Amino acid sequence: MAYSSSVAAESDLEFSTSELTGALGDSVTVLPLLVALAATTSVSLPHVLVGFGVFQIVWGVYYGMPMSIEPMKALIGLAIVGSLSYPELAAAGLLAGGVLLAVGKLGLVGHLQRVVGEPVIRGIQFAVALLLLEAAVGLSTGNLPVAVAGLAIVGLLALVGYRAVSVLLVLAIGGIVAVATTGVPTPRLPELALFPAGTPTLSGAALEGTVAQLGMTVGNAAIATALLCGDLYDRDVSPDTLSTSMGATCLAAIPIGGVPMCHGSGGLAGKYAFGARTGGANVLLGIGYLALAFVATGALLAAFPLAVLGVLLVVVALELARAAFEPVTGHRSLTVVVGVGAVGLAVNVGVAFALGAAVFWVLSGRD
């Protein structure tokens, strides 16, 4: 059944303490990835935060529930590790947005997932996790004592049941160090310009990244999120509707300096676990992102400790790897996931995706 906007009208926006804490559930992986992206590419963090702030509010109000808004992790991860420049990232995001909008309108999301195969999609997740882990090691080696201390904080908090909060705490510590180094930044409005961080550039790497990302997005951000909407919030939201809204988000956000964004089952579950029940959580989080956009200066980013950034990427990589393997059952599927991940690390995710899809097709034909 297609999503009806009348569903949103049935649920008033609430702005309670539980909605505020629930908003944090969608920022656990978002903020570390955005900070890492801004520290390693030419992207403008203020513009990226504006994009996230606006669309948190837009989709929270539209869906009338705490709909997640996350970076497209395959593309963002490839940009962080240097496989994509920001102009290539922007081009890939626009291309992915156009495809998602088209397949959503045509009702083709479920067909795409069946053609590719879930083990291949999970393998791409694992490949990106390995690439992020590789980048984290490189960032951490510059100041091992700081990196070890950060990992110790994360580990201790995880042991006492505060694993998600630990990431935000480490991020806050890095922010405090940066502020202590540069001083409190003067609030400033992000520049109003078209493609402020660089004109999109279509390349082979951008095309490969787009294909890999679409596999992840169809499985996790569309189909799995649609199922979770029913499981957690008793809402009938179709994966094609989610695909359409993700496509519209990318096409609208990237020209104003944003990055490829999607919905995601992890962020939706995170918001629920922290207490969010209405779109009010999105409105509160969106306001928070917009406030951060006014003070996220280049000098502040330059002063952010790279070793702390490495710790954040380790946590994100481990979470992404966990999500990749959690639904995998059977020796054959496990082999495909590990194989795709290994090829993605050793060669690139485009080759890994193509080989994985071919192997999956051959294995499926033997059943």
Image: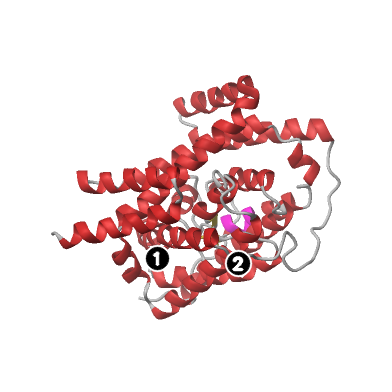
Residue beneath disc 1? 235
Q: Is residue 189 a member of the stretch shown in magenta?
A: no
Q: Which residue range is magenta in the image?
A: 281-286
Helix, strand or loop for disc 2:
helix
Q: CA distance from mark 1 to mark 2?
A: 18 Å
Say which residue appears at 46% left-offset and 54% top-offset. 268
One can see residue 237 in this view: no
Most foreground residue, 297 or 6: 297
Q: Nearer the viewer, residue 64 or 241?
A: 241
Query: In the image as oriented, which residue stretches furthest toward the left?
Result: 367
Q: Which residue is mark 2?
A: 58
- Residue 203 in which image quadrant: bottom right
Q: Secondary structure at mark 1?
A: loop
Q: Quadrant of the C terminus?
A: bottom left
Q: Residue at x 71, y 52 (%)?
A: 42
Can residue 79 be seen here? The reply is yes
